[in-house]
Image: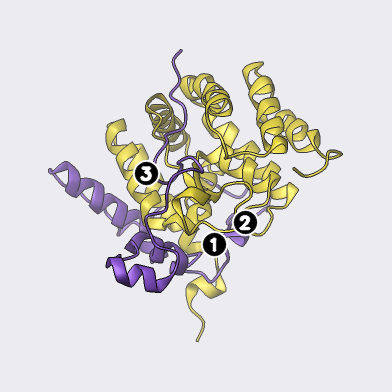
Amino acid sequence: MSTLSEVHPGVPWRESAARLAQMLESTADQELCLAVLKQLNRRFGDYAYPGFLKLLLIISESSNTGAKRRLADTIALGLRRGDVPGGILAAWGATDISSAASRRRLDPIEYLTAWFSQPTHRPPLPEGTYRECLVQLMELFNISTVARQWYPLKIEADLAGVEGAFTHQTRERLGILVDSWKQGRPPGDIAQAVSASAASAPLS
Amino acid sequence: LQVPAMKISPDSGPVSTPDPWPRDAESAELVGARRPVETDAIRTSPIDCCTGQSAEALLLHKVWSDTPGTSRRLETAPTVPLPRNEDRASAVQALTDFIFEPLS
């Protein structure tokens, strides 16, 4: 007999996202929300960060306005502290994440952009999926004035200060993303520009 | 604005970070080294936790109906109460368990 998750594979994810939304809507304590997000991310483990992102994406796509605002504000709090729940990707040139030297912990947008743009330990992320996820995450973060202001600056700081995480192509894409986000362009336009930016360039 | 750059931690450290684990098993045995549990966990942990989907497929998979007018309001089952704990650490753990439970 088939289980519920086999028949309707999205059901447990939507239920899990609903519980996260319920927590966000009913808890005014941002510190608690950030602590829960970090613990939840740890629960997924280093290999399953896309599962954590999936929950953020489901909430972003929902009509739960209060939950989206609280989630964006919580990410903003993490940005201010350099403590946004991140995911592990292989550093460029590495083929696995088995050693500390071959791993980089990246924030959601940097994670997706690096996964899309450069060889990692994961199968490549299709362009359509990257663009769709990028738009949804940016729309989510744009709900918070602080997140909208801080996130591009955070990426800019990482581009200037972190070695070994990004290829030339990834850096180029993130640079375009930062500039266009700071200009206040719509997420759809930004995703279009970012994904098309290095289409003709050789893979670094 | 002073934006904190990415944390340099064992997870995101520079390439020159030494790997304390000896490369071959014999050396490891000689020095009595034990590979950190975390490393083994990374190698063996399932990519997804419940549905048999790969991590990549998770992002592709749509959880919403595309039918126009379909509500996208997330509602939990009415029988599921939000856990309440006075102690902060317990509250974080209980809420995390509560959110993750459908996936486990």
Tell me where residue A47 appears, x and y as whole percent.
49, 58
Residue that protrudes farthest toward the right in the picture: A200
- Towards the viewer: A168 or A116: A168
Q: Chain of mark 3?
A: A
Tell me where residue B62 appears, x and y as whole percent.
62, 56
Query: In the structure shown, which secondary structural element does the residue marked by tag 1 occupy?
Result: loop
Q: For the residues carrying marks 2 and 3, which lies nearer the camera in this image?
A: 3
Residue in the image at 60% along x and 54% along y: B59
Depicted A142 relative to depicted A97: above or below: above
Asked if badge 2 and badge 3 are on a common chain, one would say: no
Q: Quadrant of residue B37?
A: bottom left
Q: Contact (CB < 8 A) between labels 2 and 1?
A: yes
How packed mark 3 is, by other alpha carbons closer than 10 Å (few <14, some 14-19, many 20 or more), is: many
In the picture of the structure, the residue carrying the numbered disc 1 is A10
Q: Answer whether residue B82 is visible to the viewer in this image.
A: no
- Amino acid type at mark 3: Leu
Q: Chain A, which colour?
A: yellow
Query: In the structure shown, which secondary structural element does the residue marked by tag 2 occupy?
Result: loop
Tell me where residue A6 appears, x and y as whole percent.
54, 74
In the picture of the structure, the residue carrying the numbered disc 3 is A37
Give the chain coloured purple. Answer: B
